[in-house]
Image (tube, rainbow, N blue to C red):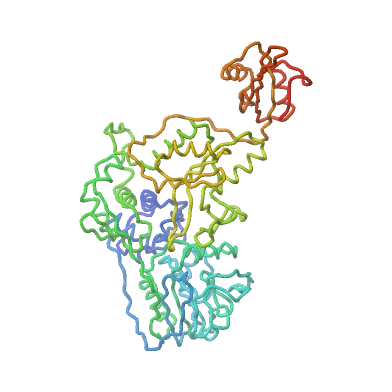
């Protein structure tokens, strides 16, 4: 995000801070400055804006932050516009449209060149000027962070339709590039022609110096839809970078009126329609319970209660009895921790001392109880002989296509869905274990499952278990969940942990367990030992385990003891499993350990 120092005065006319100090202050309130340089007697900063601060992809959002930091008044002009009675025949059929405002302006003179201040602004933002009307739409996008678009109505007609593509295979962009469209791509069309994408204008209704009538529009969309379209088309624009984030619908009237006034003042013309407004489900900001003492607790220094409330009010929050409603432009404020962060960053991170000891006062335990439950289950399962696995939450096939959550930017196109059951992941792991010839695998995984419910995305912790012996699995489940009915199928079991009670008696585990990565087959060999009397299995296992490199030995089992009546000896059959080595190394290690010859003592399993 480029930021021109002098242009901040559009919203902060009283700003007099030194540009170098401004650079440092921006960093201290969380806006990292990649660079700052003097260009044409002005300072231009290149900012790295956090992905959840879409409001700061425009001067307006950044000016709001700086007005709080410097305690300066924010200048906002509410422009009054002269509407007519003509209603634009615009329709919206796409569910991906959140809000649209549109207006028709006639008798334009777009032959006028853009004024020097506008050309300079675009140049410093590294944008090529096109013509006056287009340049003004780009200017407003950078000013407010809200993309806007203009249609030449002599080409597009007044009948615009916001819809998801069902009939167009191709789209020609403003620069003549031909894009292959996918179904459901969000578009703005007329009944017969593809006109525009949500984030990119088209050649079929492009604004030129001959344009005398236009429909201008500003909209906010479902950001997932815009991101999916942008990636599918491999096309990124300044508009797509903003529209694929949580933008503020409530700022549209302010920015749209400013754009309209600039066009009337610089292009001439007159408004020739009423204001088209589509906003079927107004977005309500959350109400957040806020404890004004918590900023001090989190920062470790005293932050006065009055300061906390004062900062939140200056940010535009409404406060009633410690219940805080953020302004709509701050889509990133959803939790109490978000409000705490706001208070601390404006109090000043630099005020937190680095040379004082940490307080010894005990802090409240804020760890969710379910995490203690998970740690306890891991301990019990490992003691029962189960191995813990970790797997991808991505799967190739949904269990229920009506509730599955599809990823928009999957790291692997073969696995586009989030798992709906832990058993899906366990089945994939069992296939891998069978390829590696792991004997008697029994394993578990605790992770999250995902699904849609009434248009909401749900994620829950779940436990999945596999045991080759269904009877033993049933016994283990009774040990773990004596009063809870567990779903089982063909050696698998799954428990939704979020649906279980989380007793406060669960405590975090301090025990550590070894983890192994299998990158080769398990090689299993038998050895027969003839002894004059039976020996305990543990003694034999301990003895021969100590003789083998632990990096090669996976497991030793005593699988049989046979008394030969002829020789009066007891034949003990040990089964050893080797890993991280090839066949030759495993057999060589095996023979050396038992001091036996290949022809007499080793049988491969």
Q: Across the whole image, how many numbered discs are drawn on residues?
A: 0
Q: Is residue 500 left or right of residue 111?
A: left
**Percent from the top left, x then y, of residue 514?**
53, 30
Q: Nearer the viewer, residue 284 or 213?
A: 284
Q: Nearer the viewer, residue 181 or 311?
A: 181
| Quarter of the image that includes the C terminus | top right
Choose top left, top right, bottom left or bottom right for residue 401: bottom right
Q: Can the viewer see residue 270?
A: no
Give the vertical position of 491 relative to 255 (above or below): above
Q: Is residue 326 left or right of residue 218?
A: left
Give the vertical position of 293 relative to 106 (above or below): above
**Percent from the top left, x then y, of residue 189?**
53, 78
Q: Is residue 382 left or right of residue 593?
A: left
**Percent from the top left, x then y, of residue 439?**
63, 33
**Percent from the top left, x then y, of residue 25?**
36, 51
Q: Can the viewer see residue 392?
A: yes
Q: Residue furthest right?
A: 599
Q: Residue furthest front?
A: 565
Query: What residue is drawn where x is 51% and y is 71%?
Result: 198
Q: Nearer the viewer, residue 512 or 574?
A: 574
Q: Nearer the viewer, residue 519 or 363?
A: 519
Q: Is residue 432 left or right of residue 137?
A: right
Give the vertical position of 479 relative to 284 (above or below): above
């Amino acid at each position: 995000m480029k930021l021109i120092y002098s242009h901040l005065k559009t919203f902060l006319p009283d700003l007099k801070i030194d540009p170098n100090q401004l650079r440092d202050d921006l960093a201290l309130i969380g806006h990292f400055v990649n660079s700052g340089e003097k260009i044409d007697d002005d300072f231009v900063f290149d900012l790295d804006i956090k992905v959840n601060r879409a409001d700061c992809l425009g001067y307006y959002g950044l000016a709001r932050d700086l007005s709080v930091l410097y305690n300066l008044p924010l200048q906002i002009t509410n422009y009054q516009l002269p509407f007519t009675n003509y209603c634009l025949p615009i329709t919206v059929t796409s569910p991906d449209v959140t809000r649209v405002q549109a207006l028709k302006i006639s008798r334009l003179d777009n032959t006028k060149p853009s004024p020097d201040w506008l050309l300079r602004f675009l140049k410093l933002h590294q944008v090529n000027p096109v013509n006056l009307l287009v340049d003004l739409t780009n200017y407003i996008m950078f000013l407010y962070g809200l993309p806007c678009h203009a249609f030449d109505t002599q080409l597009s007609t007044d009948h615009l339709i916001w819809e998801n593509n069902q009939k167009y295979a191709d789209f020609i962009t403003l620069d003549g590039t031909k894009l292959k469209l996918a179904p459901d791509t969000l578009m703005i069309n007329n009944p017969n022609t593809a006109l525009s994408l949500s984030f990119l204008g088209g050649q079929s209704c492009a604004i030129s110096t001959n344009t005398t009538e236009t429909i201008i529009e500003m909209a906010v969309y479902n950001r997932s839809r815009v991101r999916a379209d942008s990636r599918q088309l491999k096309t990124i624009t300044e508009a797509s970078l903003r529209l694929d984030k949580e933008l503020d619908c409530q700022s549209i009237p302010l920015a749209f009126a400013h754009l309209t006034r600039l066009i009337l003042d610089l292009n001439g013309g007159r408004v020739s329609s009423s204001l088209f407004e589509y906003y079927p489900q107004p977005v309500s900001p959350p109400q957040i319970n806020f404890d004004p003492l918590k900023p001090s607790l989190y920062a470790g220094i005293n932050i006065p209660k009055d300061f906390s409330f004062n900062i939140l009010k200056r940010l535009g929050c409404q406060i009633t009895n410690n219940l805080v409603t953020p302004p709509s432009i701050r889509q990133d404020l959803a939790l109490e921790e978000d409000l705490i962060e706001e208070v601390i960053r404006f109090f000043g991170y630099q005020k937190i001392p680095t040379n004082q000891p940490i307080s010894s006062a005990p802090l409240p335990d804020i760890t969710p109880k379910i995490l203690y439950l998970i740690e306890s289950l891991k301990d019990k399962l490992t003691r029962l002989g189960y191995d813990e696995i970790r797997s991808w939450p991505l799967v190739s096939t949904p269990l229920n296509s009506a509730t599955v959550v599809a990823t928009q930017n999957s790291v692997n196109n073969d696995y586009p869905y989030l798992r709906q059951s832990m058993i899906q992941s366990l089945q994939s792991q069992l296939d891998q274990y069978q390829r590696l010839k792991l004997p008697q695998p029994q394993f578990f995984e605790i992770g999250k499952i995902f699904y849609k419910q009434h248009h909401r995305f749900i994620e829950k912790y779940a436990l999945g278990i596999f045991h080759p012996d269904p009877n033993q699995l049933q016994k283990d489940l009774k040990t773990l969940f004596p009063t809870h009915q567990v779903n089982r199928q063909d050696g698998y079991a799954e428990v939704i942990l979020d649906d279980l009670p989380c007793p406060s008696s669960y405590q975090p585990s301090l025990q550590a367990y070894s983890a192994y990565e299998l990158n080769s087959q398990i090689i299993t060999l038998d050895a027969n030992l003839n002894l004059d009397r039976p020996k305990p299995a543990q003694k034999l296992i301990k003895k021969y385990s100590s003789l083998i490199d632990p990096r090669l030995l996976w497991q030793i089992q005593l699988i049989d003891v046979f008394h030969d009546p002829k020789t009066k000896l007891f034949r003990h059959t040990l089964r050893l499993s080797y890993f991280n080595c090839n066949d030759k190394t495993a057999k060589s290690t095996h023979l050396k350990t038992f001091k036996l010859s290949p022809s007499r003592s080793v049988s491969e399993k």
